[in-house]
Amino acid sequence: MIGAIYALDPLYLDGVGLAEVLITLGKVLVTFLILLLSVLFMVWFERKVIADMQNRVGPNRAGPFGLLQTLADGLKLIVKEDLIPNRSRRFVFALAPFLSVIPAFLVFAVVPLGGTFSEGDPGIVTIAGHETFAQLADPPIGVLWILAVSSIGVYGVMLAGWSSGSKYPLLGSVRATAQMVSYEAAMGLSIATLIMTTGSLSTRTMVSVQAGEGFAGFVPNWNVILTGIVPFAIFFIAALAETNRPPFDLVEAEQELVGGFHTEYSSIRFGMFFVAEFMHPVTMSAVIVTLWFGGPAGPLLPGFLEPVSGVFWLVAKVFVFLYIFVLIRGTLPRFRYDQLMDLGWKVLIPLQLGWLLLLAALNVGRDEGWNYAVVIGIGFFVVGGATFFLLSRASEVSRQRRELGEVDA
Amino acid sequence: METFVFFVAAAICLAGALGVVLSKNPVHSALSLVGTLFGVAVLFVAQNANFLAAVQVIIYAGAIVVLFLFVIMLLGVDRAENLSVDPLVGQRAAAIVAGVAIFALPVAALATTGWDATGAIANLGSVSDSAVPDVEGIGRVLFTRYIFALEITSILLAIAVVGAVMLAKKSPKAADMIVDLPARPTSTDADAASADATSEEGTA
């Protein structure tokens, strides 16, 4: 039965020898290094772009354009004194940073990093005469892996806040847990539409499906278009909330909670939270690009650049999303807590459920040969009407309750 | 290789299970439970049941134990219970009898099948047939053969959710029922906390 696991990658088809083990280790190392370097870059990028938005210069001392600033900060963090608060629970206190940083790494394992997908190519690259997928692993449950690992990330935040033995971190972690659990539901539902459209859970299959010819020959066959943008928008908002990025950063709202769940952390333990925090935009951008924007699929680059065209497209698309993440952080104000919960439970989840039903109706209609326009018309009428009714009712109730003062903001 | 994976995962499961029972700190118990769930997930993967493994992690480790921890943290773990007093008379003796009986039941069941752990292999078709992805197999079976059980279960869960909402919901007239209590003298922390709570309700 273990043999079935080997069959997931063409690398392991002819048995596993030294070369295969080395290639796998190499892939692990490369993935790990890419992520670490991208964190270094992301911190610098975010500080630079936000500085530009605020008419400042930003980091400009260490290295060209201040590129090495993050490295210097990291070294400083490592040599700083490691404080463990007296009232903390040591074991959990030491465990929490790892639980935060490791899931952030693990999400990246299922992201296809390159390879050509055009003309039905399954995205296979050849390393030293061995064929393999250009991603660390391609489990048949790829998308669920992303959900599973990001749900483990909750533990890091939660335990960090609790084990600090101080009230601000605890408040921050309680907020974080409620927020992450709530938005996971919306995220899971929007992934469900994706699975329904693609017919597969594997991230690599999703990319190769999206690499196909799209509408009218020039529109890309991306899931964001096939599912009608709404599920993507919901996924994006949920991803922002899941990673505790602004405008959903109530977890570490510095005006209210000092530093949030990592207030009591210092030195390299804090460094790990910091790495996780800046790795999230990178991994989430990569996941968004993989699931909704065709990942490394794209037209082949001309000439000698052809082998790297997959990597090129992936990096280009991820870059766009990294910029959007920073842009949102630089412009949007933070949500109030009740607004956050209202948005998650009363807007995103009903809307996504309705959209899922609509897409399902379209799928059934296509299989049964019903009139497309009629299905869309009735679907919009029913789903839209029901969603509108539910939403207006829900917001009415919550407004009344807030006026009565029953809700603690 | 499979045996090796089994023993490592089984060791993780057992260590976690012992941790759940033996830890003094409820948070450590909950964390041990996560360890056990992960061990079981690894066993699922080794049996080629990838979907079950993923669902195990998403639902049990990612949602249910998080809820456990949430409750533990909010209720506070610093309170120790007085173990010398039984809330129910004869509680301990009953627990021992029930424990032995529950242990004896599977042992007896095993003994009657001649120590063959799983009995005869069911002929429902192998889930671990590598030709059919397990997600597809489970989906097919759930929505054909077991559709009634599936729907009934979903209704049951819906009832539970609605019930929980109804229990948690305040009556619409709740605002009228709140009266302003006179502020009590705050001598201890506990009193201060409860006074805070009432004054909050009072303003609400």
Image (cartoon, rainbow, N blue to C red):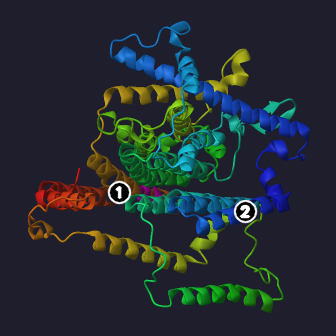
Q: Is residue A62 above or below residue A292?
A: above
> Identity of the amino acid at label 2?
Leu
Q: Which residue is mark 1?
A: A350
Q: Is residue A245 magenta?
A: no
Disc 2 to disc 1, C-alpha distance? 36 Å
**Which is nearer the eye, A41 or A203?**
A41
Q: Is residue A360 magenta?
A: yes
**Which is nearer the eye, B82 or A199?**
B82
Q: Which residue is mark 2?
A: B43
Mark 2 packing: few (<14 Cα in 10 Å), some, or many (20+)?
many
Point out residue A149 in the picture as x, y percentages from the top left corner.
58, 49
Point out residue A298 in the picture as x, y percentages from the top left corner.
61, 29
The residue marked by circle 2 belongs to what chain? B
| Residue at the (57%, 52%) spot, across then down | A148
The label nearer to you, 2 versus 1, is 2
Along the horizontal axis of the image, is B156 left or right of B189?
right
Q: Is residue B68 visible?
A: yes
Q: Quadrant of residue A245?
A: top left
Q: Quadrant of residue A23?
A: top right
Point out residue B96 in the picture as x, y percentages from the top left corner.
60, 86
Point out residue A192 in the picture as x, y percentages from the top left corner.
51, 54
| Residue at the (70%, 45%) spot, across then down | A138
Query: For numbered disc 2, what is the local secondary structure?
Result: helix
Give the quarter of the figure containing the N terminus of chain A.
bottom right
Query: For numbered disc 1, what is the local secondary structure?
Result: helix
**Which is nearer the eye, A375 or A15?**
A15
Q: Is residue A99 above or below residue B198?
A: above
User: Are circles 2 and 1 on residues that touch, CB within 8 Å?
Assistant: no
The residue marked by circle 1 belongs to what chain? A
> Which portion, as a residue range, is magenta?
A356-361
> Identity of the amino acid at label 1?
Pro
Q: Is residue A218 visible?
A: no
